[in-house]
Image (cartoon, coloured by chain):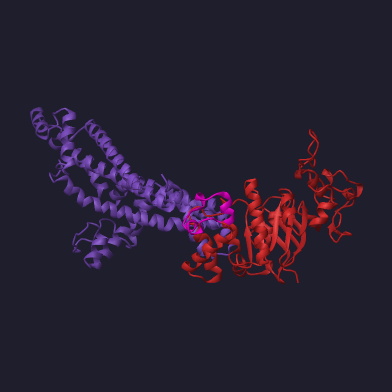
Chain colours: A red, B purple
Amino acid sequence: MSLLDVRDLNVVFQRRGERPFTAVDKVSFTVEPGQTVGLVGESGCGKSVTSLAIMGLLPKRGNKVSGEVLFEGADLLKLRPDDMRDRRGREIGMIFQDPLSSLNPVIPIGVQVAEVLERHQGRDRKQALKEARELLDAVGIPDPERRLTEYPHQISGGMRQRALIAIALACKPRLLIADEPTTALDVTIQAQILTLLKQLVDETGTALIMITHDLGVVAGLCDTVNVLYGGKVVERAERHDLFARARHPYTHGLLSSVPRLDSPRGERLHAIRGSVSDNIPWTEGCAFAPRCDNVVDACLEGPPPLEPTATGGDLRCNNPVQEEVAVP
Amino acid sequence: MLRVIVRRLLQLVVTLMALSALIFIWLRNLPGGPVEALLGERATPERRVLLTKALGYDQPILVQYGKFMQKVVSGDFGNSIRTGDPVTEVLSRAFPATIELAAAAMIIAVGLGVPLGYLAARHRGRILDNLTIAGTLLGISIPIFFLGYLLKDGFTQNIHWFPPSGRLTTGIDNTTVTGFFVLDGLLTREFDVTADALWHLILPAVTLATIPLAVIVRITRASVLDVLNEDYVRTAEAKGLRHRTIRGRHILRNALLPVVTTIGLQTGALLSGAVLTEKVYNWGGLGTLITDSISGGRDYPVLQAIILLAALVFVVVNLLVDLSYAFIDPRVRVR
């Protein structure tokens, strides 16, 4: 049994008097214990909404979530809110994009780590703070004793993200969801945080869902990659296969748009033309068709199905890319 | 922190000095005055001159001010022209009455306003929210004396739930310790006094509380709405924390910062509202004293003392607010 089995997850935003918008469109993927799975795509492709739906953190009003999110066989979407509350932070941890705004500015770091232990492990404040100190130490925060009483504005961005990782991993969850954990950080710090995450999931055997738009992050971390476009999975492959042979024109475009140091001087940077706003609804064809170089008539006649590939992945494309892309 | 307090206290002294000069000059330039009030319109010019001289009002205004300040420094605000009692004594009777009323109003405004504002924000766009918004609009726009008379007529004329005026039922024997009757009753274990004082306090306090209540509800609602969108609230949810932890530690703790500031600023509104409220309910506090002192013959010494006292209260409350702000928000603690 997979640790997490997302089946036909559908999230529709519907505000009164507005046209419903399908943010996540029948997305399915699995996460095995200890595995690192990437959800990749540009802004607005539904990757963050997917993660919030798994966590049950979408706003209560204005959206409709359907499908199944099986965590160790139990459907999280059918849990009572209080039961879900018991699992969040204990069985599934989450790290967010902006470490400064994700920490409460008026509460000491120590308490913010300790409170999750108090809640789920039944520790008293003193014991929880002691463990919080060890956790801060484990995520590589120098002088953890002093940090316990400091506030978020007093520590650096990298340390804040480390503190958030400590919070998310405090109860040794079996699944960790990281939603663009390095986007708000300096490039040098990004590498440190990714190394730390890799080290921690290896040590603890925690499975990781890595949400990112950065293919460099995928290359360094993920076992399997799901590429999302317009709320649908368009390609799924093992990391190696994806980088060696991206089949979907969108994935291909993403890979070729990574700037390379060894390319000749003055060569134009590759970009995928158009923007997400050019998308057509999946009901009318392939959402990527208006931006696609490989578009054929079939692409505008109906949504292409997600079909297994020879390498064991899945692909949703009528006219996949044949050439190989160089791995950046 | 200590340096901040010292600096603020020095600022306070300067503020009060400037204010006292302003009041002094302003009062003496008002038409009419104690002499006219005491002697009446048909007094002979000779008598007027005599009384003016006796009261010292014939001297240059700077000299008068100098003498006044000299006495004030030693705690002497002179005697009331109207009654002849020492001003300090007159104020020590009226001041606790007003503070008791204002404190009760603030307790109602905060105690009701914060939960209401929180609930409205949490139920944004639903019936409870809409009712609250409509209610606060009414609360802000209704004139305080009108509401006062409305409540008074409503609850004391036909249904006698509350007494129409005063701070205690006549005939109740109370021992004055602090001048706050509710507190005095508790201190001297005369619980009938406390009960009676509370009974008298409710209508005026509710009247006076409406405007601060409405303001606090709105500020709390807006502030909670802001905080609800903050990433750290989502983090708290992702931790699986209990509702009450998220509400208290993560939402309200942050959302109350602007509310605390509002409480300080509303002190001014409370003091001016007290004048009207006290008039309606014949409360016998600073408000009553101020109207009596103006209409009853420009009682300069009393008026000067009241305005200075009100300013002092306002400045001190806001100093406390600023200090508590630093206590709640670690980001303003440095410096």
How many numbered circles does the render carry? 0
Q: Quadrant of residue B82?
A: top left
Expressed as whole percent of the image width and height from the top left, the position of residue B280 reads 30, 50
Examine the rendered structure and indicate whether residue B205 appears above or below residue B14: below
Expressed as whole percent of the image width and height from the top left, the position of residue B26 reads 25, 32
Q: With A19 as the anchor, is B12 left or right in this view?
A: left
Q: Quadrant of residue A91?
A: bottom right
Examine the rendered structure and indicate whether residue B67 appears above or below residue A237: above
Front residue (pair A72, B127): A72
Expressed as whole percent of the image width and height from the top left, the position of residue B334 reads 42, 47
**Residue located farthest toward the right when viewing the structure as drawn:** A297
**Residue located at (25% from left, 41% from top):** B308
Front residue (pair B205, B245): B245
**Residue located at (76% from left, 45% from top):** A276
- The answer to whether residue B224 of the structure is visible from this angle is yes
Q: Is residue A90 magenta?
A: no
Q: With A186 as the anchor, is A273 left or right in this view?
A: right
Quarter of the image with the N terminus of chain A is: bottom right
Front residue (pair A222, A116): A222
- The answer to whether residue B150 of the structure is visible from this angle is no
Front residue (pair B184, A127): A127
**Residue located at (40% from left, 52% from top):** B327
Which span of residues is magenta-colored? Answer: A141-162
Q: With A106 as the anchor, is B150 left or right in this view?
A: left
Expressed as whole percent of the image width and height from the top left, the position of residue A227 reads 78, 54
